[in-house]
Amino acid sequence: MVACLFYVLFVVFVAGHGAGLNCTRSCGNRGPDIQFPFRIKGEQRDHCGFDLSCSDDNSTVLELPTGVSLLIEEIDYRHRLVYARDPLGCFPRKRLNFSLGASHFQINWQYDWTLFNCSSNEKRSSYRGFKIPCLSAFNHDVYAVYSSDTISESDLLSCTKMHNIYGFTYPMLVEENYRLTISWFNPTCGSSEAECYNSILKHSKGMLFFHILLCFLLLAN
């Protein structure tokens, strides 16, 4: 009976707060408004959607399904777009994976790349690649080529292959402190905060009925 009482109180609590659905928050005064389908993890109800977090300096942080953390500067709820930057201003600095697969987020024009370290002291007539400024230095340049391309007839043969990176767009490689645009699809619970709330409430009522029935069956025995 204790379990039954718990679920009764839970559903009553949720139903009592349904009329005041409002998930709008922010990470400090300079952060974007956070509302459906996003929520601040640990501070807003689960039906508010995808998790965001606040850093120590009140920056808004999104962790992509690949584990990459980005700083969110703006959220366009009308067009379902998120504008984000790499915390270090150089997306390819780490061996990151932006291939999002079957997630609710999407980045257009993504490609897989192979990076090469080339000595800047050597003169080369041409490169079959794109120079990455934020990885290059006074004594070497770093170039990226499509992983599907062959370099057998290019000057990159004298360079050292570094590693592959996945799901990067061209501007993410060549523009320092690039502002990335990410689109999203609605969460599985619905297209609005109210739909997601009602979905959770319906599930809770179903669980309530199940546990009450289970309690009566246990008492009958």
Image (spheres, grey):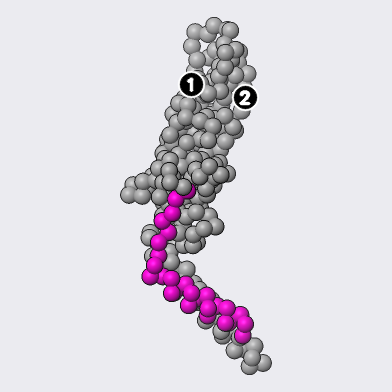
**Numbered disc 1: secondary structure:** strand
Task: Please rate how many residues cluster around mark 1, counting C-alpha atoms within 10 Å: few if below 14, some from 14 to 19, many from 20.
Answer: some
Location of the N terminus by quadrant is bottom right
Query: Residue type at mark 1?
Result: Phe
Q: Which residues are magenta?
A: 1-27
First-in-chain label (2 vs 1): 1
Residue drawn at x 49%, y 43% is: 59
Q: Is residue 43 visible?
A: yes
Residue drawn at x 43%, y 46% is: 29
Query: Residue type at mark 2?
Result: Met
Q: Is residue 114 left or right of residue 192?
A: right
* 3 is higher (above) or lower (below) than 74: below
Q: Indicate the position of residue 25 as horizontal and vertical percent values.
A: 43, 54
Task: Please rate how many residues cluster around mark 2, counting C-alpha atoms within 10 Å: few if below 14, some from 14 to 19, many from 20.
Answer: few
Which is nearer the eye, 138 or 121? 138
* 180 is higher (above) or lower (below) than 16: above
Q: Farthest residue in the left direction? A: 78
Location of the C terminus by quadrant is bottom right
- Residue 22 is one of the magenta-drawn residues: yes
Q: List the residue tagged with mark 1.
A: 130
Q: Indicate the position of residue 183 as horizontal and vertical percent values.
A: 41, 45
Q: List the residue tagged with mark 2.
A: 162
- Residue 139 is one of the magenta-drawn residues: no
Q: Is residue 150 visible?
A: no
Q: Farthest residue in the bottom direction? A: 220
